[in-house]
Amino acid sequence: MLTEFATVLVFIVLGAATVALMLGVSRLLQPRNPTAVKLSTYECGEVPFGSSWVQFNIRFYVIALIFIIFDVEVALLYPWAVVFQRLGLLAFVEAFIFIVILLAGLAYLWKEGDLDWVRTMQETPPRKGER
Amino acid sequence: MFLGNLESLKYFLPELAITATILLLVAAHVASKNRRSAAPALLSLAGVGASLLLVGLLPGGPGTSLFEGMVALDGFAVFFKALTALATIVVVAMSMDSAELKDKSQAEYYIFLLSVLLGMFLLAAATDIVMLYLSLELVSIPSYLLAGYLKGRARSTEASMKYVVYGATASGVMIYGFSLLFGLTGTTHIGEIGRGLALGKATLPMFLAAAMVTVGFGYKIAAVPFHMWSPDVYEGAPTPVTAFLSVGPKAAGFAVLVRFFYTVFATPDAAAGMWKFSSVDWPLLFAVLSAVTMTVGNLVAINQKNVKRLLAYSSIAHAGYMLMGFVLLTPVGLRAILFYLVVYLFMNLGAFYVVILVANGTRSEEISDYSGLGSRAPFAAVALSVFLFALTGIPPFSGFIGKVYLFAEVINRGVYWLAVVAALNSVVSLYYYARIVKVMFLEDPRESAVLPVPAFPRAMLCLLVLPTLVLGVYWEPVIRVAADSVKLLAF
């Protein structure tokens, strides 16, 4: 078993050496002629403006989390569907329970209003218990 | 013997009961209009109670391996399931009384709480490193959410953030250790890993793997040097959550620590200690960890002004005391850990209960605001004194007996220096525990208004004081159960 770790070690050493070699050679051979345009951030050809340290709307993250529900569902159900006929009734019941649990999550999201992108702004209630 | 998936289900009823309760809570949350009703709390009380009952009905005999070797059903798992379910019931009762959580959405809080409980059940029983990792995350992730449950309060958010960062790092290091173990032995079942490691002579990778795994477990039990998160999290989180984190996940952390190391590293036939591989001085390593943990916890606690922070450091110190039982990896020492966890559950939850009741009235957790509590709320003050003296380990309270068992094993096996360090630490801890008692009874109250303690919390406090007193004089049944549980730790 230990010899297999040796393979990993060789891989790490080779990887590090390759990176060092390529950067080093390019450093030696490259003509250096920096201009302001060359040094600017690449933003798909647009002229960059502002700082990239801005706050994103937190709902992007919520949407990403919602996506996981469906993502996980599909990841499990695809292989399940392929061998479904061989697995029989038991697998059907298991998958059914799995989907029902995920549906409970979906119902929760719906109730919380996280599925609507356009929302009326709620007034923040006055904070209680702040000291 | 390994049971298949379907046959395992009938031994899995406690977990299924919790899962069903969680789903019901989600349904109740979606269906109901009133977010502050007491229904979710009652529903979770019923669910956890049912699950505790089912745990009691489970056969506690020699271990059965469920789900093709994923989780074990043995006396050890049953012991920790009962312990964590009991802690959760007390915490649910606390949460119903807490003013902090009154205007928060109730159902979601209990969903998180019960998810942690489900994770702890699985963690105490996991015998496969993948299952172990999954259940550790199931404990951690809802804990992060619970710590940050007071969304408007900056401290609570900070607590949650710190918890996530530390937790993610610790579990990352731990799973790296697991990957090394898998690489060394080619299996994920911890019994097989133990047998596989016994064959090889790979000392350094094995030590690395064990050290990395210890990081993950050490973070859960808040042992120094993996304790950094705990004071901030304990102070910032809502008090019932703090109480829960200081007992539940800590107990589950000890469960997994003991099961993992006992299964992988213990040998049943050594006289001096049970460590199988002598290439590294394991007893010394864990003895130092234990000594440092209790010393740091106690010394830093001396200067604390906030009760929750003080109890956080005290709970670090108690993790250090409990690690004493782990040093030699003998069944007698492990028995002492299990017994101490039972005792610790009652006294620590009790102390936090009083903190909640006082904070409901005074809106403060500063020790100076406890002045004159003896005259303002005599019942709560006396109860808190009992819990604090029990935490110190003064006879006739239960904490004393717990400490006697922990000390006894270390002294019997000749690790005298650790016993001396622990004894000195107990003296130090007396100072800061007694300081609270002094403030409560000897200092004049700043306000003279009586702090009301309603009937329900009063009854709950009685229920927590009672075991703290009784286990100090009649502890034999509990220590017997603890001894049996360790004996039934299945490989």
Image (tube, coloured by chain):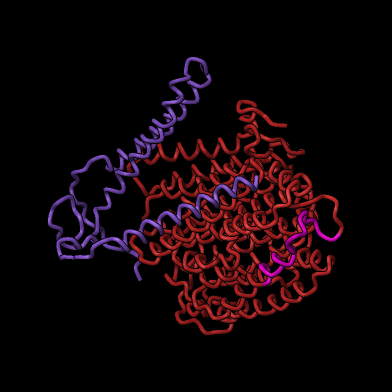
Chain colours: A purple, B red
The residue lying at 58 percent from left, 66 percent from top is B351
Give the position of the N terminus of chain B as an image quadrant.
Answer: top right
As rendered, which of A100 and A26 lies closer to the eye? A26
Left or right, B65 with respect to B457, comes to right
Res B312 → quadrant: bottom right
The residue lying at 54 percent from left, 56 percent from top is B173
Residue B450, placed above or below residue B163: below
Query: Residue A37, image x and y in percent?
Result: 14, 61
Magenta residues span B272-291
Give the position of the C terminus of chain B as an image quadrant.
Answer: top right
| Magenta stretch holds residue B50 | no
Q: Residue furthest front?
A: A29
Left or right, B333 with respect to B230, comes to right
Res B26 → quadrant: top left
Left or right, B343 with respect to B369, comes to right
Left or right, A99 with respect to B178, comes to left
Residue A13, placed above or below residue B123: below
Residue B61, placed above or below residue B92: above
Query: Residue B326, image x and y in percent?
Result: 72, 60
Q: Is residue B94 visible?
A: yes
| Magenta stretch holds residue B273 | yes
Query: Residue B128, image x and y in percent?
Result: 62, 42
Q: Is residue B456 visible?
A: no
Residue B62, placed above or below residue B463: above
The residue lying at 69 percent from left, 63 percent from top is B323
Count of numbered circles on the image: 0
Query: Residue B343, image x and y in percent?
Result: 68, 60
As rendered, which of B133 and B16 lies closer to the eye? B133
The residue lying at 19 percent from left, 65 percent from top is A33
